[in-house]
Image (tube, rainbow, N blue to C red):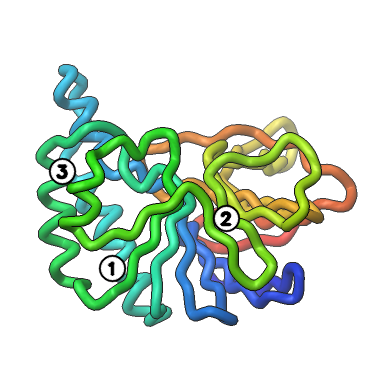
Amino acid sequence: MVRQHIWHNQRFWLHGDKVMFWEDTQTLIASDLHLGKSGHFRKHGIAVPQEVLKQDLMRLFALLQHFKPQRLLVVGDFFHSHANKEHEWFARWRQDVAQLHILLVKGNHDVLPQDWYTQTNIDCCSEWQENGLRFVHEPADRQQELPIICGHIHPGIRLMGTGRQSLRVPCFYFAPQQCILPAFGVFTGTHPIQPKKQDVVFAIANQQVIPL
């Protein structure tokens, strides 16, 4: 379920529940939770079960109990859209982990008013730099001065079986200067990536982290 990977002299633990624990700073890193997305769809008449949000919050709480991080760092799209009832559920959940420092690098879907982030004790920024790494939401399309950790595209990789069987699963994607995290949220899809020879990919299947 957990696999160690050292990248730019930093030690990371990749978890089958689509998060990464940064051992050097005792930080749990996640991307693209899209909390409130199911409620957003229900507001527009699309029947998405309310259990989606509860499942994501239960998974996140279990991961916090497992790693016991000093901080949760979300590299964008923590929330999905404007406020709905599911954001009230998150606010109640936040009270159960009130001591946890949460840092959000805002993504394109993080459009709630700043007052809401303040009330739920979430620190926000457009990017974050630490230990020679740069944290942003969207991948860079050209070489950057600092290595990037990001999300946004919900990376997926196709696993091939016998015959013509295939299955696309989420993955952790490490290029020499860029790490793209899988989407944490249950109610999210995947976008196929095309790794190059020097890239390192870890597929996630049945909560197992599989090096390819």
Judge by depth and name the residue closer to the eye, 113 or 51: 113
Which amino acid, by three-letter code, is at mark 2?
Phe
Residue 94 placement: quadrant: bottom left
Q: CA distance from mark 3 to mark 2?
A: 27 Å
Residue neighbourhood size for the residue with mark 2, other residues' Cα within 10 Å, grouped as few (<14), some (14–19), many (≥20): many
Q: Is residue 203 above or below residue 19?
A: above
Q: Is residue 208 above or below residue 76?
A: below
Q: Is residue 72 above or below residue 167?
A: below
Name the secondary structure under disc 3: helix
Is residue 201 at all visible to an observer of this figure? no
Mark 3 vs mark 2, foreground winner is 2
Name the secondary structure under disc 2: strand
As drawn, the label of residue 209 is: none
Contact flag, marks 1 and 2 (Cβ < 8 Å): no
As drawn, the label of residue 61 is: 1
Q: Which residue is mark 3?
A: 86
Residue 121 placement: quadrant: bottom left
Residue neighbourhood size for the residue with mark 1, other residues' Cα within 10 Å, grouped as few (<14), some (14–19), many (≥20): some
Is residue 12 at all visible to an observer of this figure? yes
Quadrant showing the C terminus: bottom right
Which amino acid, by three-letter code, is at mark 1?
Phe
Residue drawn at point x = 18 percent, y = 53 percent:
90
Position of residue 153 measured from the top left corner of the image (x, y, whole percent): 56, 36
Residue drawn at point x = 24 percent, y = 52 percent:
117
Which amino acid, by three-letter code, is at mark 3?
Glu
Name the secondary structure under disc 1: helix
